[in-house]
Image: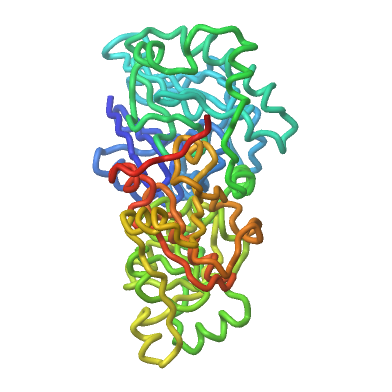
Amino acid sequence: MYFKQFYLGCLAHASYLIGSEGEAAVVDPQRDVDQYIAEAEAQGFKIKHIIETHLHADFVSGHRELAARTGAEIIFGAKSGAEFPHRAVSDGEEIKLGRVTLRFLTTPGHTPESISILVIDNDASPQPQKVLTGDALFIGDVGRPDLAGLRGYTAQQMAASLYESLHDKLLKLDDAVEVYPAHGAGSMCGRNISKETSSTIGEQRRFNYALKPMSKDEFVRMMTADLPEAPAYFPRDAEINRTGAPALEALARPKALAPNEVDALSEKGHLLLDVRSSAAFGAAHVPGALNIALSGQFATWCGTLIGLGTPIVLIADEIGAVDEAVMRLARVGIESVVGYLAGGLQAWDQAGLDIEAIPQMPVDELHDRIAEGADLQVVDVRRPGEYAGGHVPGAINLTLAHLEQEVSNLNPNRPTAVICQSGYRSSAATSILQQHRFTEIYNVVGGTNGWVNAGCAVESPI
């Protein structure tokens, strides 16, 4: 048996290629599918099946394009409602890949149609050696139960189903069975996911907080309490996956735009998306640009902060970054990039157009200014749970996802220092505040991590 995990760090997403005797299946493919085709060819496999463990909400899948390019059959759980030719599987159904058997388990809870896949290498044993759990069981966590609300299911109903899926099916497996989920740390499909990308049933039975002995009612209460807010784009991406995304090659390539053209489009309401680092953006940028750097969870934050269909002009240091940004935006269903600033910020400067900056404030300077009693409003743009875990004393918590709607809670005429965990989200936040004409803004370099590492005092709820 051939088995390979593909891990996409920016989306914390794991997909898989399983093969035997010239036949292969791809599980939970990302939107750009070339790597699966190349790997299958290199190993001498023909991709016969494309399996989706559920309708993913945090990214757009490449199942339609991969099927069109390989002739493979698409497989979903029976309750997916997918609107394209596919095979709907029920509990206990199997497919064969040479000497490998893939057996499907219906494991609803994260979504109604969720399935897990038992992987059986018949040359080794007739018993399952691996299980691909999708978003039902993560390493250190389980799938959140509140994402099917628009489909008529309450979080309580889904949590009860998840309890049954875990205890009646997945935890019935042998402790030695290896666990391979669809997401890792950083995914918003869970709330306490480990950085590890695989484990075993035995390890999860011992260490996963959600698998500790408890009644179904206790589990439901725990899983539906204090859930982090899901990004606004999740329902949209789930629907795209239900209908099937077009092939990436069908997307129009963005046009190279001269500075005066970018300036004119900005006046017409196009979003200027600066994908450079926070340091580069802080040093100099086009007025009104939103900074979401390619170096972090770019696609997730773009999906959260940018409205569907918003026309986008990219600003990057070089053309490779433009191409990467277009790809990563498409992975979350954003296909509205119309162009990019040819020549980057250097061309803009040479055209004699205005440039803005945002000073970068080290944590020791922030500490000193607070100690001196400076008139400074500190804004922490992390999620409420992060803020509650410890924050700069006196900091106001306005999450990045809602900053645009809550900016009226701040005084734009006061000096404002913005902080997050590391400096990534705070840079995006400072660019939003600058759009709202805040007169003096600072991005705190190193964020709360740097504050804590410097030994500065933190405040937390009593």
Instruction: Tell me where residue 162 appears, x and y as whole percent.
Output: 58, 19
Numbered marks: total? 0
The residue lying furthest to the left in this view is 42
Residue 94 in view here = yes
| Location of residue 125 (image quadrant) | top left
Question: Quick check: 342 left or right of 220?
Answer: left
Question: Vertical placement of 135 versus 40: above or below?
Answer: above
Of residues 256 and 260, which is closer to you in this image? 260
Residue beneath the point at 53% across and 25% down: 115
Question: Vertical placement of 319 versus 30: above or below?
Answer: below
Residue 73 in view here = no
The residue lying furthest to the right in this view is 152
Instruction: Tell me where residue 22 appears, x and y as whole percent.
Output: 30, 32
Image coloring type: rainbow
Question: Vertical placement of 127 versus 116: above or below?
Answer: above
Instruction: Tell me where residue 194 appears, x and y as whole percent.
Output: 37, 29
Of residues 455 and 287, which is closer to you in this image? 455
Residue beneath the point at 34% across and 17% down: 200
Instruction: Tell me where residue 259 appears, x and y as whole percent.
Output: 45, 86
Residue beneath the point at 48% across and 14% down: 211
The residue lying furthest to the front in this view is 372
| Location of residue 327 (image quadrant) | bottom left
| Location of residue 36 (image quadrant) | top left
Question: Vertical placement of 163 versus 29: above or below?
Answer: above
